[in-house]
């Protein structure tokens, strides 16, 4: 890939910083997020090996120490040889230099059995998400950062919008090959191949699955519940599998970077909060394909469009949080009394409550939950601000600490695939 074709990633700066700080950097993310492209563009003196090469995999499994000579070294798909991580631990304990080892994998290493212990204190973990709309179009990652400022600049949210562009983005997701597909049919074929590859390769690297049809059925059912509270008993019932099997399969989906469980915000112990996490897919295009939503007409027929809009917003929030996961937290807030905030963003003791509204109009009644959240947290954080993302054009204020912003700023008009470089 030439320099003119490469699309810079938001995570690049954090990755460079990590390599200057820690002896082991682990870069995870689902297959096709662009991990290999990113790491191969690092300083040219780094050796690069991939465990997709069967000879390299055999050496990593049988004589892992022999691979680790002459760092700095990048090892792609390192999750395929867990014993390699123990060899890296031994090497780092003898010679500790920043940036010696960069590991990538299509699984979240801290969730793999034994991995967290083997690299404890020696590694930093970064997560490369699939492209969000702003990143794909070459935009900067500052829209959400601006919401934490003492005097936020809302001008970037007030630019001309393509109001229904989010629907196109949620169908396409964030994988570069899918974004390049010029037709719905071509994109559907690509997603079908992607899921098949995940089931037949990545999943088997993680665990022995007795019934792949059962697992794929659970994936389809889980996709239908994106943006909702996770009810494992309900999913197990609908999938026709045991509850313990459902729990294991969901854990594998999370370990394999396919789903994300967003936890509830619990800073106020005096409020009766819903403790169940919310389920989101890491890539909205995969979720749509699993649900049989192959084009805009099929999406328009859904009676749960609000949840899909929330999924589309989540994809950008996930990319924003991944840039600096040590300072940024993402959760949601819901009380048993029915008050709800879709997302809660935290950064350096400052809190932004985010409510997503599909309507093009917004009034005082639409920001009631934001007001309740602010009142509940006002004395527990350095600052608390409420943001309602809605489908209108204008920035609207509902007091000094609540503002409504057009969600269209997150979804720029889609560049035709034939004109897109990445």
Image: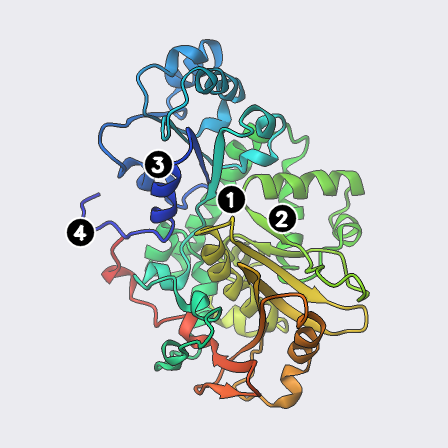
Determine which of the numbered discs, if any, sits on residue 219 in the image: 2
The disc, 4 or 2, on the residue closer to the chain's N-terminal end is 4
Which quadrant of the figure has residue 255? Answer: top right
How far apart are the alpha carbons under marks 2 and 3? 39 Å
Q: Residue at x 34, y 59 (%)?
A: 136
Vertical arrangement, residue 173 with respect to residue 44, above or below: below
The disc, 4 or 3, on the residue closer to the chain's N-terminal end is 4
**Toward the viewer: 159 or 416?**
159
- Secondary structure found at label 4: loop
Looking at the image, is mark 4 or mark 3 nearer the viewer? 3
How far apart are the alpha carbons under marks 4 and 2? 37 Å
The disc, 1 or 4, on the residue closer to the chain's N-terminal end is 4
Place of residue 232 in the rendered image (x, y in percent of width and height, measured from the top left): 76, 50
Determine which of the numbered discs, if any, sits on residue 4 in the image: 4
How far apart are the alpha carbons under marks 1 and 4? 30 Å
- Secondary structure found at label 3: loop
Looking at the image, is mark 3 or mark 1 nearer the viewer? 3
Q: Are marks 2 and 3 in contact (CB under 8 Å)?
A: no
Determine which of the numbered discs, if any, sits on residue 20 in the image: 3
């Amino acid at each position: 890939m030439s320099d003119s074709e490469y699309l810079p990633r938001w995570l690049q700066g954090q990755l460079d910083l990590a390599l200057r700080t820690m002896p082991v950097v682990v870069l995870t993310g689902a297959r096709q997020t662009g991990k290999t492209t990113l790491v191969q563009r690092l300083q040219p003196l780094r050796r690069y090996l991939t465990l997709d090469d069967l000879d390299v995999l055999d050496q990593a499994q049988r004589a892992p120490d022999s691979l680790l000579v002459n760092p700095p070294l990048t090892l792609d798909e390192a999750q395929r040889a867990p014993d390699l991580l123990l060899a890296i631990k031994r090497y780092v304990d003898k010679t500790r230099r920043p940036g010696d080892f960069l590991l990538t994998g299509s699984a979240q290493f801290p969730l793999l059995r034994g991995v967290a212990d083997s690299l404890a204190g020696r590694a930093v973990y970064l997560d490369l998400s699939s492209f969000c709309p702003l990143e794909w179009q070459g935009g900067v990652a500052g829209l959400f950062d601006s919401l934490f400022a003492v005097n936020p600049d809302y001008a970037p949210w007030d630019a001309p919008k393509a109001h229904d562009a989010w629907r196109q983005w949620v169908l396409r997701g964030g994988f570069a090959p899918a974004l390049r597909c010029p037709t719905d049919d071509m994109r559907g074929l690509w997603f079908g191949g992607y899921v098949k590859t995940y089931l037949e390769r990545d999943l088997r690297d993680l665990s022995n699955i007795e019934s792949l049809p059962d697992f794929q059925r659970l994936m389809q059912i889980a996709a239908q519940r994106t943006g909702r509270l996770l009810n494992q008993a309900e999913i197990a019932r609908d999938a026709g599998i045991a509850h313990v099997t459902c729990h294991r399969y969901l854990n594998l989906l999370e370990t394999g970077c396919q789903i994300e469980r967003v936890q509830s915000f619990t800073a106020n112990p005096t409020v009766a909060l819903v403790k169940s996490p919310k389920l989101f897919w890491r890539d909205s295009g995969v979720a749509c394909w699993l649900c049989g939503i192959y084009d805009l007409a099929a999406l328009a027929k859904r009676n749960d469009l609000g949840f899909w809009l929330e999924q589309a917003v989540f994809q950008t929030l996930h990319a924003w949080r991944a840039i600096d996961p040590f300072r940024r937290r993402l959760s949601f807030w819901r009380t048993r009394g029915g008050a709800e905030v879709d997302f809660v963003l935290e950064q350096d003791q400052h809190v932004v409550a985010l409510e997503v509204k599909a309507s093009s109009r917004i009034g005082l009644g639409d920001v009631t939950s934001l007001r309740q959240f602010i009142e509940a947290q006002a004395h527990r954080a350095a600052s608390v601000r409420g943001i309602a993302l809605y489908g209108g054009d204008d920035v609207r204020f509902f007091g000094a600490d609540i503002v409504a912003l057009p969600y269209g700023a997150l979804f720029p008009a889609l560049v035709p695939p034939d004109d897109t470089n990445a």
